[in-house]
Image (cartoon, helix red, strand yellow):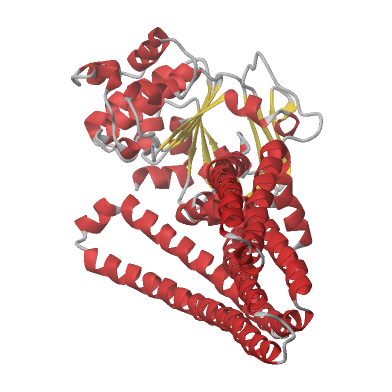
């Protein structure tokens, strides 16, 4: 916990000037609250016993002084409410940027297990509560401590006996608060986890809404959501039970303080130990004294919300990317595209068996290699190792003789283009999605890439051409159109190494012919790996590799492998 608190405090560093000003105005506001009862005491204890002329003359000064106090208090609270919140928003901005940047560095293995909705909850809801704590926490503590300390000093000066009566209840109240506080922290953490689960479920439902509707499973989805929502409500009820007990208990204790003071005051007045103006002033200060205690009660809830959010924030930040640049990693230029696998084996983090075993493979620059095999043979996995989406468990992969682990990730992936079966297009225009392949490219380059991918014609058929908005994930486009945009993106990137991951398997025959033509044009003079679902599409490959769980079982051209009568021949006939 101490380590997390240190890290949390570290976010104040860039904003120390505004933080210092925020604290200064908090002190001013606390000072005003402490001074006003003293003015009341002077009026009730001293001023009212003077002659009327003196009273009227002094009241003018007192009114002016009180007006200055009101203005000072008003501006102090404005500064805290405005600039203090802006400071909190800036810290939230910094944390969100840091978290998003860190998430970009995490590898595929992290996202294999993560739920997008839960990650969204950490970036939005959790961070808001953290910054509310970072903004209000210090000023609430400072205000409360100043008011409590100031009130204690002044109360002691008025009557030691009344002060003892007021403080007799405090030890019991603090023990009560400490016990409830621990239970609240556990309850608020459970709230975070349940709301993250609901976010994940909502994201999953809305992303797959067309599947939901096509199966008419709205009732099933509502039931699944109801179960999650019930869990959230149960967690909320649990936390509110503790919070209600906490707030009502502390409120009862603060009321009990006033009761003790009134009873003790009445006894002391009866025995002529204090006079009535002192009791009135004391009761006013009891209000100043108990108000910060209530503030600290609210702060406790705020702290539980914010700190549990910060713990969840640090959970993600503490995950080290399992794929990162090693010390001394360098950029590469003028890549030819020779790719070599040397005794490569691989298994996933949660796997007990290797997906790939002792794969040895040499693909010279510019060659067109197809990978075939049954599902689960490791075709996609093998290709995912080249751009280091995953790292090899054993062995080495080299590009132009250099171990890919000695190349910076950015430089490595800059020289590899991937066209996948499940095309992901971003919300925005056609132009923006093609431009993603080479940010900063000219409009002419984008159009040329679209023409090379056989996409220019269908793009221009839209009224807005390249500025057409394609909707979330390109929902307004057909499968073939989306695929051609993804190919145009790679044309614009112009990498020397290509990976086609079953890029045409989900298309109809006409779309497949157009896309296949685009792919062949793109593959010309580049080192190309094609993961083939339909074996008819790779008959002209210079080399076909048949992959099984034992590694590469067969290798050759289509004609050679058919003549061999082995695994490939069986797959082809099927």
Residue at 70% x, 79% y is 174
Query: Can you give x and y, in whole percent of width and height, for residue 205 in the image?
Result: 33, 57
Regarding residue 355, the answer to whether it shows in the image is no
Query: Can you give x and y, in whole percent of width and height, for residue 411 in the image?
Result: 65, 24
Tally the numbered discs: 0
Whether 87 is drawn above or below 311: the answer is above
Quadrant of the rendered image containing residue 483: top left
Residue at 68% x, 54% y is 31
Regarding residue 527, the answer to whether it shows in the image is yes
Q: Is residue 375 left or right of residue 429?
A: right
Quadrant of the rendered image containing residue 520: top left
Residue most extreme to the right: 328
Q: Quadrant of the N terminus?
A: bottom right
Residue at 39% x, 28% y is 486
Residue placed most toward the observer, 267 or 166: 267
Query: Can you give x and y, in whole percent of width and height, for residue 72 in the image?
Result: 59, 45
Residue at 26% x, 30% y is 511
Residue placed most toward the observer, 155 or 298: 155
Residue most extreme to the top: 444
Residue placed most toward the observer, 434 or 484: 434
Query: Can you give x and y, in whole percent of width and height, for residue 227 in the image?
Result: 36, 74
Whether 521 is drawn above or below 130: the answer is above
């Amino acid at each position: 916990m101490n380590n997390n608190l240190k890290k949390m405090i570290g976010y104040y560093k860039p904003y120390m000037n505004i933080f210092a000003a925020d604290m200064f105005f908090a002190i001013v506001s606390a000072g005003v609250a402490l001074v006003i009862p003293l003015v009341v005491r002077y009026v009730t204890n001293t001023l009212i016993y003077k002659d009327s002329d003196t009273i009227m003359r002094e009241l003018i000064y007192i009114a002016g002084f009180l007006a200055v106090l009101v203005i000072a208090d008003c501006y102090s609270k404005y500064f805290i409410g405005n600039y203090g919140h802006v400071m909190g928003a800036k810290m939230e901005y910094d944390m969100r940027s840091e978290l998003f940047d860190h998430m970009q560095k995490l590898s595929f293995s992290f996202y294999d297990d993560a739920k997008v909705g839960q990650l969204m909850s950490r970036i939005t809801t959790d961070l808001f509560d953290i910054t509310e704590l970072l903004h209000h926490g210090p000023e609430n503590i400072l205000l409360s401590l100043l008011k409590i300390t100031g009130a204690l000093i002044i109360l002691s000066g008025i009557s030691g006996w009344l002060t003892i009566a007021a403080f007799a209840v405090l030890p019991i109240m603090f023990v009560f608060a400490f016990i409830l506080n621990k239970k609240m922290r556990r309850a608020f953490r459970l709230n975070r986890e349940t709301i993250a689960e609901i976010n994940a479920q909502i994201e999953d439902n809305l992303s797959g809404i067309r599947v939901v509707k096509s199966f008419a499973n709205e009732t099933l989805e509502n039931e699944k959501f109801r179960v999650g929502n019930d869990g959230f409500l149960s967690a909320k009820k649990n936390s509110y039970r503790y919070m209600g007990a906490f707030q009502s208990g502390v409120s009862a204790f603060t009321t009990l303080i006033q009761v003790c003071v009134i009873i003790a005051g009445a006894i002391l007045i009866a025995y002529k130990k204090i006079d009535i103006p002192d009791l009135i002033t004391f009761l006013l200060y009891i209000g100043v004294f108990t108000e910060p205690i209530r503030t600290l009660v609210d702060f406790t809830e705020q702290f539980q919300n914010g700190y549990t959010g910060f713990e969840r924030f640090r959970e993600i930040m503490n995950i080290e990317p399992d794929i990162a640049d090693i010390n001394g990693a360098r950029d590469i230029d003028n890549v030819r595209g020779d790719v070599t696998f040397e005794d490569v084996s691989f298994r996933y983090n949660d796997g007990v068996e290797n997906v790939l075993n002792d794969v040895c493979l040499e693909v010279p620059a510019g060659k067109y290699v197809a990978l075939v095999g049954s599902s689960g043979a490791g075709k996609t996995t093998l290709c995912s190792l080249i751009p280091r989406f995953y790292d090899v468990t054993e062995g080495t992969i080299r590009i132009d003789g250099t171990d890919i682990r000695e190349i910076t990730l950015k430089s490595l992936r800059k020289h590899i283009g991937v066209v996948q079966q499940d095309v992901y297009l971003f919300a925005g225009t056609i132009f923006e999605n093609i431009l993603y392949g080479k940010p900063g490219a000219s409009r002419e380059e984008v159009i040329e890439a679209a023409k090379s991918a056989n996409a220019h014609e269908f793009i221009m058929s839209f009224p807005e051409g390249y500025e057409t908005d394609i909707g979330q994930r390109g929902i307004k486009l057909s499968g073939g159109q989306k695929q051609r945009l993804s190919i145009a993106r790679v044309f614009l990137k112009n990498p020397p190494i290509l990976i086609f991951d079953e890029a045409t398997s989900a298309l109809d025959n006409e779309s497949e012919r157009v896309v296949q033509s685009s792919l062949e044009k793109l593959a010309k003079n580049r080192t190309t790996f094609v993961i083939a679902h339909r074996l008819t599409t790779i008959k002209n490959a210079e080399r076909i590799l048949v992959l099984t769980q034992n590694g590469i079982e067969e290798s050759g051209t289509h004609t050679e492998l058919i003549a061999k009568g082995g695994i490939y021949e069986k797959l082809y006939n099927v």
